[in-house]
Image (tube, coloured by chain):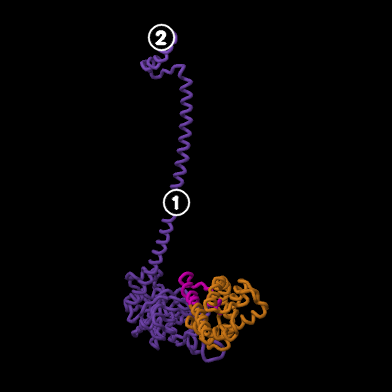
Amino acid sequence: MNFFAFDIRKLLIVIAVIALPILSINMKRNPGEDPWYRRPFTWFIAESQGGYSSFTSGVRGTTSMYLNLMGIKKDNMRMQRENEELRAQLGALTELKLENERLNQLLQFKLNTKMRLLASKVIARDLSPDHESIRINRGYRQGLRKQMGVITVQGVVGYVLSTEMDTAQILVVTDRSAAVDALVQRTRARGLVSGKDSNSVRLRYLERADDVAVGDAVVTSGMKGSFPKGFPVGKVTSVRKTDFGISQEALVEPVVMPSNLEEVFVVLDSGGEDFNEKLATGFGAPLLSKMNQPSQPVASPPSALPTPAASTPAASTSSPAPQTVAPPIADPVVKVQ
Amino acid sequence: MKAKALLVANIFLFLAATLLLAGGQTSFWLQIFGYFPPPALWIPGLVYIALFRSTLTVIIVSHLIAIALATSTAMPEGLMMISCLAVALSVQIFKTRFYWTATTYFMLVCGLATLMFHLYHFAASWVIADHPLTSPAVSAWVIQALLTPLFAPLLFPIFRWFDQITHRTEPPEITGAYSA
């Protein structure tokens, strides 16, 4: 084969084909110039690129949306968990706050009295719904003895029925077998408080001639020393006097409801405390604010009774503004709140 | 000798369980649900004994249960003993009239026994107690009578287990050999 024996036409075509890119490189590309032969290709490539682009962006969008959803789901679960934790913490803190307020109230009460008190917690209730007794977490090891009085800041709860080493059973004043010596604060009429049902007690064995009226305050007599003198028991809601007989009976709404009990005080020693001076008017939560008041009582109209704000725990812990109160027994039109 | 020891152990187990359940009823329920009436969790133990023991055993165990539970209530011991005994004997009488072997029977009897306990207590308080029950907590009775059967199926296997570990002969009603 002769190397130089070639077809000149073929050679020219090959050279032209090889030279085309060289020629195009060397050609200057003018912006804005779009030759007619390039348009179909440009269109096609643009369309295909656009297609690819929208496809990939769609895939990327879907993928990222899926990934985001996964992330959102995780975030949502995490935030829900956090929310639940925060809610639980809030509930616990609220409970702690309320407990703190209650305990603070109890502490203030304990600090402002001559009585020797032992704070304790209610740990159980009575087995039978027809009896009213509770069990507290203090027993004879802590100095509890039978018949010791049990109170709260608001009033009388009951007394110790039996003691074990570290617990004691308390017979609540609303139990029908309970008996607490009591007085009608206004007239000093004496009777025996015993339970009727969980919401009311009876003041029994009042003398027929005794002056007892609806709304009268009933307080402890302090005779046996289990309770301080003049400590609130309840208020008279009705008086029953039969045509015959030597006594009359009053129905009393207790200031302490057994269903609300959480912490109580056991009166280890009443210390001769007399609440008649402190409880000039009214009952219940204002007791503590009354105890912080100046001791000289000044006669005042009923409008000078403590405001509800004064009865709140916050108000009771701070030093309340001096208030005037009516003398304990002298005012016959004393109103019970 | 061994049989007597097992019998004592069986009774002791039932007493311990009854006390634990009464503790749960009076204390655990209080911490969770406050003063809402709890189920009478100690009743199923008494009912089980009443259903599957001889009358003499029932009398002894019901008295022991009453004495043990009287520490958890202000109810006088005598009143508790009479009420428990009346409930246990009533369950035995009820069994001679109506009986079928199913969980629902145990649940039904537990509910009835709870209600009967309160009724007997109410009646006995008027007959023998110093302070009769003038204002019965009827709503609490009903709630207890409805709640107690819900817990009965959970307690039944435990009582059966007590019988098994103390080698008590399984009641024929449970084994299917009963033909009343």
Taking A15 as reference, is B119 above or below it?
Answer: below
Residue at position x 37%, y 16% from top?
A: A22
- Crowding around mark 1 (Cα neighbors within 10 Å: few <14, some 14 to 19, many 20+) is few
Quadrant housing residue A304 = bottom left
Q: Secondary structure at mark 2?
A: loop
In the rendering, at what x and y percent does residue A19 appear?
39, 14
What amino acid is found at the position of numbered circle 1 in the picture?
Asn
Q: Which of the 4 quarters of the picture holds residue A8?
A: top left
Query: Does the magenta portion include A103?
Result: no
Chain ID, mark 1: A
| Above or below, comparing residue A169 to residue A42 in the picture | below
Quarter occupied by the N terminus of chain A: top left
Q: Is residue B23 magenta?
A: yes
Q: Secondary structure at mark 1?
A: helix
Residue at x 33% of width, y 72% of height: A322
C-beta proximity under 8 Å, tags 2 and 1 = no
Q: Position of residue A147 (x, y in %)?
A: 41, 86
Q: Residue at x 34, y 74 (%)?
A: A107
Q: Which residues are magenta?
A: B20-46
Number of numbered discs present? 2
**Chain B as rendered: colour:** orange
| Same chain? Circles 2 and 1 | yes
Q: Which residue in the structure is indicated by mark 1?
A: A76
Kindly identify which residue carries mark 2: A2
Give the mark nearer the N terminus: 2 vs 1: 2
x, y percent for residue A17: 42, 14
The amino acid type of the residue labelled 2 equals Asn
Name the spot of residue A317 as percent of width and height, x first.
34, 70
- Closest to the observer, A15 or A167: A15
Whether residue B66 is visible to the viewer of this picture, yes or no, is no
The alpha-carbon separation of the residues under discs 2 and 1 comes to 83 Å
- Colour of chain A, in one word, is purple
